[in-house]
Image (cartoon, rainbow, N blue to C red):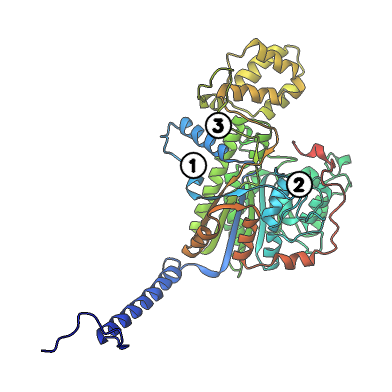
Amino acid sequence: MDSEPLLPNPNDSRKPANWRRIIKYISLTLAWIGIFSYVYIYHGTASKLTPTKKNVIFMVTDGMGPASVTVARDFKQFKYDLSWDEQLFIDTYLVGSSRTRSFDSWVTDSAAGATAFSCRSKTGNNMVAVDYDSKPLGTVLEAAKLQGFKTGISVTTYVSDATPAAFASHSVTRWNADLITKHLLGDYPLGRSLDLMVGGGRCFFYGRKDGGCRYDGENLLKTAKHSGWNLLENKTAFDALGENNAPVDLPLMVLLAEGNFPFEIDRNASEHPSIGEQTHKVLDILDKATKKDDQGFFVLIEGSRIDHAGHYNDAAAQVQEVLAFDEAFQAAVEFADDSSVETLIISVSDHETGGLSAAKQVTPNYPDYAWFPEVLLNVTHSSEYLAAKLSNYKETDLLSFIEEDILQDGMGIYDATPEEIQAIKKARHKSLDVLSKIISKRAQVGFSTHGHSAVDVNIYAHGNTPALQKRIDKYLRGNHDNTDIGKFMESWLRVDLDEVTAQLEGLSVGEGSHYSSFGVEQHPL
C-alpha cells in the first residue's frame, strides 16, 4: 500500500496546494488590515483633520529644571490637600530630556539656548539667532512665515528679551534691544515675520529722554503704527479681543508692561493676564485668523519669569510661576485636542536656573530630610516685590516696618529672629537675596547659584493625531541635544532654514563682543 510520507521530499520543489492557498489568504488579509488601518487612522479618528494644514505651539519654560517641577508638584499637593499620586497636568506629557550646553560654554544662557531651538544650531552665549562668526541664521518661525503661516510670540517678560528675540531677530548680543525691536517690527530683509506680539518691554520702543530705554532715541511705537501695526497697552483692551466673534486686526502688538510682567504671586488680575489667560487669548486669535488659510500658525509661548525666580533664589515665587505655566500648557493641549488642524505642542526649557534642590541642610549635623511647604504657602509676595517696597520706604520706624510689613504681611513669618531683622535692615537697599534666603532656609529648599546650571531639562510634547504622536514618540523620546528640537520642527513643518539663512546674508547684526555690557541694566541678572 502506498502512503504519503510524513515529511515532504526535500528534492521536490513543488509546494502543496493547501499551503499556497494559506499563504494567499494571509497575504490578502494583511493587505486588507493595512488598508483598513490607514483609513481608520487618517480618515476615521482623524477625519476632521486637514492633512496639509499644521499648527505649532512651541512653549519655553525659561529656567525650569526637573527640581522645579518636583517642588511645584509637592507644593500643589500640600496646598490643595491632594494625594501623593496627584500630578501636574504637564507630567503625563513627559517624553524625554534635553542637553543644554552652548557652543562656547557648558552652561548656556537664554540667547544661545533659544537659538538652538529656533535655528537648530549652536551659538555662543548672549548671541541671538546668529552663528559664532556673527552671521545671521534663519529661524523656524521666519521659515514658517515665508510659507504662509501666521506667527506670534507671547511672553511674560519683555518681547525683545533673549528667548523671543531668537525667533524673529538677529543680533550679535542679546543686550542690543535697539536693533532687536526693529527686527521684531519687520525692519530687516525678510520684512515683517510676526503677526502677533504679547508681552512687556514697552520701554524698549521709545527713547530714554522720554522715559524709555532706547539709546537711539527713536520712537518705534509711532513707527509701528505708521507701518500698519495695531497697538494695545492695557488688559481691558486685551481681554476684549475677539469677544463676540469680533475680528482681530493683525499685525497686533500688545505691550502690557514697561518691563517684565509681575510675578504670578504679585500679579494684579485687573492689570496683567496670567500666562494661562494669555495662552487662551493668543491661540484663539491665531486660530480665527487662519480659519480660511491653507496654512496654520506658529506661536512661541514663554513662561519667562520662572527663570527670574531662579535667579533670585525665590522658591515661593517660582512654584507659583510653574503652576501658572502648567495651566497654560493645559490650555494649549485642550486647544489642540479640540482643533480641526493637526497641531504640535512642544514644551522645553532653555536651561535650569538657580541650581534648585528639593532639600537643604540647615545645620552642621546629619540632615533631617524635611521640607516645609507651608512656609512657601504663607508668602504673599515675591522677594523682588518686597525688596523694592523696603528700598522705597521713607519713614523713620524702619524696624517695625520690616517686622510687620515685610516679614509678617509679605512673608508670613511671625517668629523672625533679631539676627534676621538686622540682616534685612543692613541690606535695606539690596535685600532681595537676604529675603529669599530666609524663606529657603525655613522651607528647607536649596539653591546652588544665582545663575544657570548645566543640568538636563525635560521635554514635554503632544500631537493631536495618531501619526503626529507616533512621530513624537519616535524622534523626541529619550535624551537629545537642544538643537534636535529645532530640527524636529523644521522637518515636520517641511520648511528649509538654510533658504532663510541665504536670504539674510549681509544683514547687519550689530556690534559688541559676545559678552557685551550694552544695556545690562535692562535685564534683571
Of label 2 and label 1, which has the lower sequence position?
Answer: 1
Q: Toward the viewer: 375 or 296?
A: 375
In the rendered image, the residue lying farthest to the left is 1
Q: Are marks 1 and 3 in contact (CB under 8 Å)?
A: no
Tell me if mark 1 has few (under 14), some (14-19) or many (20+) residues whose alpha carbon lies within 10 angstroms of its own. many
Tell me if 141 is positioned left or right of 39 in this view.
right
Task: Identify the image quadrant of residue 31.
Answer: bottom left
**What residue is disc 2 on?**
125
Q: Is residue 253 visible?
A: no
Separation of residues labelled 3 and 2 (CA atoms): 28 Å
Q: Nearer the viewer, mark 1 or mark 3?
A: 3
Q: Nearer the viewer, mark 2 or mark 1?
A: 2
Residue at 32% over, 78% down: 26
Residue at 60% over, 49% down: 98
Which quadrant of the figure contains the C terminus?
Answer: top right
Q: Which mark is residue 358?
A: 3
**What residue is disc 1 on?**
88
Give residue 354's position: percent from left, percent from top.
Answer: 65, 34
Q: Are marks 2 and 1 in contact (CB under 8 Å)?
A: no
Task: Identify the image quadrant of residue 323.
Answer: top right
Residue at 67% over, 68% down: 147
Tell me if 11 is positioned left or right of 102 in this view.
left
Task: Identify the image quadrant of residue 447.
Answer: top right
